[in-house]
Image (spheres, helix red, strand yellow):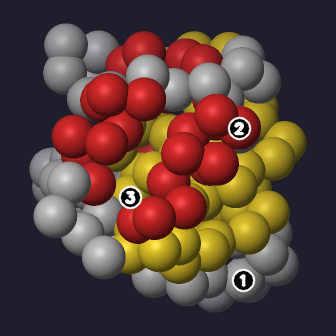
Amino acid sequence: MNKDKSILLSLHPDFALKILEGKKRLEFRRRFPILPTGTKVYIYATKPVGKILGECQILSIKKIEAQFADFYIQKSGDNREEVLNYIRGLQEFIVLEIRNPIKLNEPAFIQDLFSEIKRAPMSFCYVPNK
């Protein structure tokens, strides 16, 4: 596990809930850093929710050639057309495999957990471990 850093990850509210309910274990990204297994990820649901809903851990992060997208889309259960539109034009994309989702008892504003973060990240940002 990465003892120094965690990630605050911005997600559409529907995707955030699916992850926290254990229904979504793969997340697609156009780019993302390669992080060690066990890195903690705080899940921020974008507006209209605008709060951190929970956390999970990274099981793996893989760079995937675009020609293999269908294999991962089928495993993810995500809408094929939406994912293909999202990765259109890329030669490769990133698949985050996640584990151990934990929903917070009470959703929290970013500043309640991380006073140094002044606004929600577009995609992700590093945060200190809590």
Q: Residue at x 29, y 15 (%)?
A: 49
Q: Residue at x 55, y 17 (%)?
A: 17
What is the x, y in percent for residue 55? 65, 42
Q: Which mark is residue 36?
A: 1
Residue position for label 2: 75
Residue 114 horizontal side relative to residue 27, left or right: left
Amino acid of disc 3: Arg
Mark 3 or mark 1: name the one nearer the start of the chain. Answer: 3
Residue 118 horizontal side relative to residue 113, left or right: left
What is the x, y in percent for residue 93? 40, 68
Do callouts 1 and 2 mark residues in contact (Cβ within 8 Å)? no
Do callouts 2 and 3 mark residues in contact (Cβ within 8 Å)? no
Residue position for label 3: 29
Amino acid of disc 1: Pro
Is residue 8 positioned above or below 26 on the image?
A: below
Mark 1 or mark 2: name the one nearer the start of the chain. Answer: 1
Q: Quadrant of the C terminus?
A: bottom right
Front position in the image: 67 or 56: 67
Front position in the image: 53 or 37: 37
Q: CA distance from mark 3 to mark 1?
A: 17 Å
What is the x, y in percent for residue 24? 66, 29
Q: Residue at x 19, y 13 (%)?
A: 48
Amino acid of disc 2: Lys
Q: Which mark is residue 22?
A: none
Camera-side mark, 1 or 2 = 2
